[in-house]
Amino acid sequence: MDLLTRVVCALLLLALLLAVTPCPGESKELCPHPCRCQRRGLLDCRHAGLATVPPATRRRALTVLDFTGNSIATLDEQTWKEYPWTETLVLRDNELQAVKSHSLEGLFLLKHLDLSGNRILLIEEGAFEPLPFLRLLNLSGNGLTQIHSSTFQAWHGMQFLEELASLNQPGHPHLP
């Protein structure tokens, strides 16, 4: 890594640390209702009866968001703007029917994405464009019958994607 890259990385890290440091007198409330935050960095919204992703109650470095077992059906382009530090997002067993080109905006640092057990029939071209560091993608248990290779074409080349879970198995979608 050259000197310029190191300096840029160090400045980005400093900016991240300053952004998540609470201000004196700031509320201690970390979790949007009805979610739980029992461990630092984890937003646990499993089986919370949610129809939408709740807005964050304050800026906090939540790196793991778990929305397993809710009724979330859509993700708009503003959904994740208050969760910029997310590295793991679990939306397993919800009501999602499509992953649109704007559905994952704001999740620049995301590495693991679990969309299994939904009703996804469509993944729009460019849907994964906002995720340059994505390493694991789980799409199992959806109604997908085919995923076009252009789905994974992005400016960053999806270079870190290591695992596309449950694809190329009998009864699961395949890449043409």
Image (spheres, grey):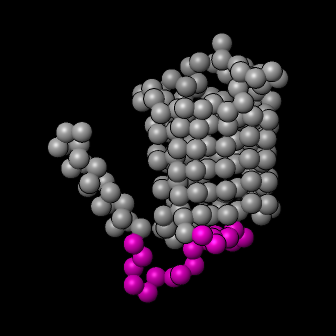
Q: Position of residue 140 (x, y in %)?
A: 75, 34
Q: Main secondary structure of the magenta part?
A: loop
- Quadrant of the rendered structure where residue 17 is? bottom left
Vertical relation: 97 (above or below) 12:
above
Q: Is residue 27 magenta?
A: yes
Side of 113 where 92 appears, left or right: right
Vertical relation: 117 (above or below) 85:
above
Quadrant in which the N terminus is drawn: top left
Q: Residue at x 67, y 70 (%)?
A: 36
Side of 127 where 46 appears, left or right: right
Side of 132 where 76 appears, left or right: right
The magenta region covers 21-39
Task: Please say whether residue 88 is visible from this viewpoint.
Answer: yes
Vertical relation: 58 (above or below) 155:
below
Task: Please say whether residue 73 is visible from this viewpoint.
Answer: no
Quadrant in which the C terminus is drawn: top right
Q: Is residue 92 magenta?
A: no
Q: Residue at x 60, y 32 (%)?
A: 163
Could you say which is closer to the camera, residue 13 or residue 147? 13
Q: Position of residue 133 (x, y in %)?
A: 47, 39
Q: Position of residue 159 (x, y in %)?
A: 45, 29
